Amino acid sequence: MDVTHIPVDEIRRPGRADGEGSVQVQMDPAVKIDTAKVFAIYGKGGIGKSTTSSNLSAAFSKMGKRVLQIGCDPKHDSTFTLTKKMLPTVIDVLETVDFHAEELRPEDFVFEGYNGVMCVEAGGPPAGTGCGGYVVGQTVKLLKEHHLLEDTDVVIFDVLGDVVCGGFAAPLQHAERAMIVTANDFDSIFAMNRIVQAIGAKAKNYKVRLGGVIANRSAATDQIDKYNERTGLRLAAHLPDLDAIRRSRLKKCTLFEMESKPEIEAAQREYLRLAAAMWTGGEPLPAVPLKDREIFDLLGYD
């Protein structure tokens, strides 16, 4: 039986040895996104991936693109600045029909947000059980079955935290480019290095490649620049530590809906510039990750 068709309750049924469900879920190779440009947004937990993803989705929509954002975090808060509400997750709605996906309608799990951006929250299995890769696979499968990807130009996966298992890396099997959000500090760059490793592993069998680094909540980029120079990465955008960004989350809106002020307008322009560059594309970055000790020795001051 194909594991992508096994309900979560079966994946975590009683009697299984502890840890047995931790093996990597094998994605169905027939389920592909081949009608849109697909980007996966990665970075350390709490670094601002959802804010970045939502503002990027808004920027792409401002360019006239039809955008779909898929949140891949159990706390399902990726799209609330676009929709002004917490959406039910794909797993939530699948449970209501006892995992009979054919009973779902698109309006059960796809919701329209700011400027026409379509929003989906994949969610995740209960804590300590199952695999996030299963959830991503089911979400893409549903979107394909309902033909919701055929009228989409851009798909953005907003992926949770550090990459510690194959499930976290599942969106890389669909993405064309992976963007990494980081701050100008050791912990963020350490997490970025692990993400570079994951992307390199997936690039051996899939089309995904590194697209660049988005510096977020950072006045300077000197530590990021050190890492990029050493590994072959490149800075794609720089968003400073603006209180307006924090306030936009509290107001449940994107930066494109905030009051007109010079610093907000500058951030809007940076997101529009980044979206245009991502749409145009470019040569992938063949970055080589560092050993943990190498990062420790590289960063900081003499």
Image (cartoon, rainbow, N blue to C red):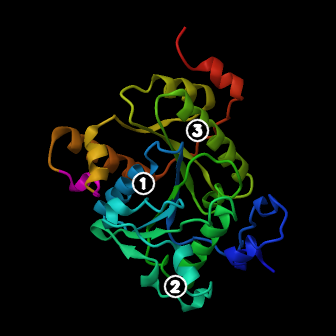
Cα gap from disc 3 to disc 2, whole angstroms: 35 Å
Along the viewing direction, whichever of 280 and 75 lies nearer the viewer: 75
The magenta segment is 252-258
Quarter occupied by residue 80: bottom left
Cα gap from disc 1 to disc 3, whole angstroms: 17 Å
Please identify the quadrant where the C terminus is shown.
top right
Task: Pinpoint residue 135: horizontal percent, then vertical percent.
Answer: 62, 69
Label 3 Cα crowd, 10 Å radius (few <14 / some 14-19 / many 20+): many
Question: What residue sits 62% from the left and 84% below the top?
Answer: 99
SS class, disc 2: loop
SS class, disc 3: helix
Residue 194 counted in the magenta span: no
Task: Pinpoint residue 143: horizontal percent, then vertical percent.
Answer: 53, 78
Tell me if 35 is positioned left or right of 13 in this view.
Answer: left
Give the residue number, with chain letter if any, for mark 1.
Answer: 53
Q: Amino acid at mark 2?
A: His
Disc ID at residue 192 = 3
SS class, disc 1: helix
Q: Are marks 1 and 3 in contact (CB under 8 Å)?
A: no
Q: Amino acid at mark 1?
A: Ser
